[in-house]
Amino acid sequence: MKSKKSIPLALGAFLLVTAAAPWGALPDAASAASAASAGTEGAVFSASTMKEQEQMTKQAIVDSSYQGTEGAVVDGVKQYRSVQKAILDVPADQASPYVIYLKAGVYKEVLNVDKPYVTLVGENAKRTVITYDNASGTPKPDGSGTYGTTGSATVTVKGENFTAVSVTFENSFDEANSPYQNKQAVAIKTQADRAIFKDCRFIGNQDTLYPNLGRQYFVDSYIEGDVDFIFGAATAVFENSRIHSLDRGSDTNNGYITAASTLNSNPYGYLFINCRLTSDPGMEGTVSLGRPWQPGGNTNAIASVVFKHTHMGSHITSTGWVDMGASKAENARFFEYDSRGPGALESLTRPVLTKEQADLHTPEAYFGDWDPKKVLEGLSPSFANPSLGHH
C-alpha cells in the first residue's frame, strides 16, 4: 500500500506518543511470505518444548475423564474433572502463576475466572477445548430474560494476570440455524489487566473475542468469526496470529473484523503486527477491517486500530473501514502500515502511517511497564519464543 491519506489534526495526540524501540516487529523489507506464515491453528511444539511443559510446576491437573474426587491430591498435585472447580480452589490472594494443566479433551463449561494469576496450560491447542453454546438471545433457565452479549461468554476473565497457553476457547452456538434474533455469542470476555494468550484458538461467529479492559497480549494464535468478532475497549496486541473471516453467504458484506470501543483518553487500542488475515473461499472484497463502536452512544469512545506488517487476503474491501451507525469511520483512529497481499489496496479511506508514525506503535509502547514475554519465559523458556511452528 503506497498511497497516504493526510492524518487529521484531531488525531495528533494519538500519533505523537513516546515509545520504546520496537520488539517483535518485522523489518520494513521483510517478505510477504514471512507475514503470510503468521498465525496458528495449533502450534507444533518441539520435543524439548513438550518436555518442558510436562516438567512445569503444576498446582492442578484437569482431565475430562477423571473419575475421582474433585480436588483430591495425587502425587502432590490436585486432580479435577471440571476446569471451573479447579479455578474455584485458587487462593483469592494468589500472587504468582497458579498453573492448571488441562489434558486434551472437551470441557463443556461456562467459566468465571475471578481469581488473580490463573494460568491455563493445555496439552494441545486443537484438542484442549473449553466450549459452551449460549448466545445473546438465549433465554436464561430461571426465566429472568436472555443472557445478552456479555452474559453469553463461554469464559469471562475478571482476575488480573491471567495466562492461557495452548487452549481453544469456543462458543459453539449454532448461528445459522438458531431462531433467536440476537445471535451475538462470545467465546471469551477479558475485563482484567495483564492477560496473555499464547498458541490459543478462539472459535465463534459474531462477537467471538471481547477484550474489554486493561492490557492484553495475543501471540501465535488463531481467531475466527464474522461480524465484529474482535471488539471492546482494551489495549490489545495481536502478534504473529491468523485472523480468519467466515462466509456469511453474502456477495457484498460478509462482516467486519474489529469493532473497537477505545476511550478517547487511551492512546492505544488494538495493534495487529505480523499477522495474517484470511477467509473462507469466494469472499473477495466483502470483509471490512473494522468499524467504530460507541457502546450506548458513548461519544468518548473513539476506536483505535492499527494493522502493521500484516498480510491481507482478497476478502478485504478497498474501503477498509466503515461507519457503525452514527459513529463515523473517518473520525476514528484507524491506520495501516506496510500492509501486504491482495487485500492491501490503495484507497483514500484507508489511512496509512508514515514510518516515523508506525515506529511509535510497538508492543512495548502499548504495554508500558508490563512485559508479557517475560511472564511466558518464567513459565517455560520456550513459551517466550514467537512462532513455534504451525500446521
Image: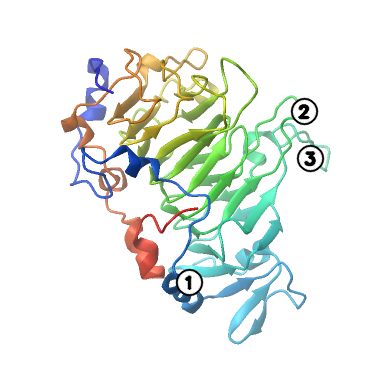
User: Coloured how?
Assistant: rainbow
Residue 86: where, in percent of width, then height?
A: 63, 67
Query: In this rendering, would 189 be left or right of 277?
Result: right
Q: In this figure, which residue is indicated by the disc labeled 1? A: 50
Along the line of sight, the residue nearer the viewer: 130 or 88:
130
Q: In the figure, residue 124 lies in which quadrant? A: bottom right
Q: Identify the disc placed on residue 163.
A: none
Give the foreground label among 2 and 3: 2
Query: Is there CB contact under 8 Å for labels 1 and 2?
Result: no
Give the foreground label among 3 and 1: 1
Query: In this rendering, would 150 be left or right of 142?
Result: left
- Residues under labels 2 and 3: Cα distance? 13 Å
How crowded pointer 1 is (Cα within 10 Å; few <14, some 14-19, many 20+) is rated as some
Residue 391: where, in percent of width, then height?
A: 50, 53
How crowded pointer 3 is (Cα within 10 Å; few <14, some 14-19, many 20+) is rated as few
- In which quadrant is the N terminus drawn? top left
- Residues under labels 3 and 1: Cα distance? 41 Å
How crowded pointer 2 is (Cα within 10 Å; few <14, some 14-19, many 20+) is rated as few
Could you tell me which residue is drawn at 38 percent across and 55 percent down? 387
